[in-house]
Image (cartoon, rainbow, N blue to C red):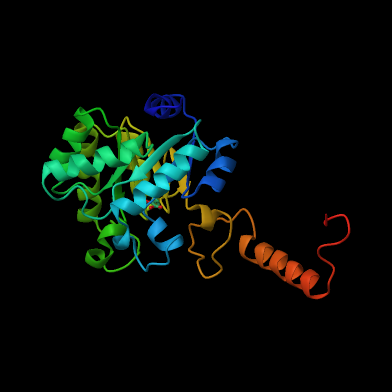
């Protein structure tokens, strides 16, 4: 079973890490047979699977259901589950209960957004034997504080603060760090200074690996085309074409034919 040791080894060996989000059993089965290194049950599920406007709407129950489905479909992969909005910001008992529920749902590791005010909790979770992936830059759970899904750490003081937080998270014990929507030069500096791997999204080419959301990578959201995104399938139009064809076959009485009937 792949583990966080594989993550460190990949960085040590100078090999890039690929990570893709996953939310359901069927796509996890496909991912299980792919060379992708790790699956992220992102709280982006709240948006791309449930239609909410932000990840603030992800709940612990939602994340547990998605994590359970993905871990069943992808037994050979490392499955990292997002701690949902505020799940680690209450008292330690409630936090550890949330950690326990996500791990028992099948996660191999958890991801926690941000550092300010969370370092002690993150250290405690790591010391409890639960691998934690950090997440800095655009932390979408704080979208209302940040004022939108925009590029972060664009001033020198914000860049310095992010670099400090990255070091603090490493000290707290995180095994890897997602850098989202930060200037490429800053992502390179963080990656060079830390010994843990960094995984970028909108953070340029120098991070130790890259992550994309399943629906974005497969071009399924026709209204989402940020500069950082490369699509590898025309999912939206290919699926629509298939549906048009099925509809036409049904209405033209061409489906099912004799061979497709009993
Ligand atoms: O929830 C998510 O999909 C994420 C990735 C974009 C890193 O956190």
Find the residue positioned furthest to the front. Answer: 262
Quadrant position of residue 139: bottom left
* Residue shown at 39% from the left, 48% from the top: 65
Point out residue 141 in the picture as x, y percentages from the top left corner: 28, 58
Q: Is residue 260 left or right of residue 242?
A: right
Quadrant position of residue 99: top left
* Residue shown at 45% from the left, 61% from the top: 48
Q: Quadrant of the C terminus?
A: bottom right
Point out residue 120 in the picture as x, y percentages from the top left corner: 13, 38
Q: Is residue 230 left or right of residue 142?
A: right
- The reply to whether residue 142 is visible in this rendering is yes
Rendered position, 174 above or below 223: above
Rendered position, 145 above or below 134: below
Find the residue positioned furthest to the right. Answer: 258
- Number of numbered discs overlaid on the protein picture: 0
Rendered position, 98 above or below 148: above
* Residue shown at 13% from the left, 48% from the top: 117
* Residue shown at 48% from the left, 48% from the top: 22
Point out residue 204 in the picture as x, y percentages from the top left corner: 44, 49
Q: Is residue 243 left or right of residue 110?
A: right
Point out residue 31 in the picture as x, y percentages from the top left corner: 56, 41
Q: Is residue 12 left or right of residue 117?
A: right
Find the residue positioned furthest to the left. Answer: 91
Rendered position, 134 above or below 234: above
- The reply to whether residue 134 is visible in this rendering is no
Q: Nearer the viewer, residue 24 or 257?
A: 257
Q: Nearer the viewer, residue 148 or 195?
A: 148
């Amino acid at each position: 079973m792949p583990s966080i040791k594989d993550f460190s080894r990949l960085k040590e060996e100078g090999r890039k890490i690929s990570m893709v989000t996953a939310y359901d059993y069927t796509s996890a089965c496909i991912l299980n047979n792919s060379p992708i290194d790790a699956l992220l049950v992102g709280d982006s599920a709240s948006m791309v699977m449930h239609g909410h406007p932000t990840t603030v709407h992800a709940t612990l129950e939602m994340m547990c259901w998605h994590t359970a489905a993905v871990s069943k479909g992808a037994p050979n992969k490392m499955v990292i589950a997002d701690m949902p909005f505020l799940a680690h910001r209450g008292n330690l008992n409630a936090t550890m209960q949330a950690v326990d529920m996500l791990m028992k749902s099948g996660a191999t590791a958890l991801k926690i957004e941000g550092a300010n005010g969370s370092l002690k909790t993150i250290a405690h979770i790591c010391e409890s034997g639960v691998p934690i992936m950090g997440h800095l830059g655009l932390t979408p759970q704080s979208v209302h504080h940040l004022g939108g899904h925009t590029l972060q750490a664009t001033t020198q003081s914000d860049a310095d603060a992010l670099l400090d937080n990255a070091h603090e998270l490493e000290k707290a014990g995180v095994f890897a760090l997602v850098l989202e929507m930060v200037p490429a030069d800053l992502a390179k500096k963080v990656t060079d200074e830390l010994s843990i791997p960094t995984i970028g999204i909108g953070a340029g080419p120098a991070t130790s690996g890259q992550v994309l959301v399943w629906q974005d990578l497969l071009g399924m959201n026709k209204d989402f085309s940020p500069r950082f995104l490369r699509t590898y399938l025309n999912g939206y139009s290919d699926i629509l074409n298939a549906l048009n064809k099925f509809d036409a076959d049904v209405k033209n009485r061409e489906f099912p034919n004799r061979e497709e009937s009993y």
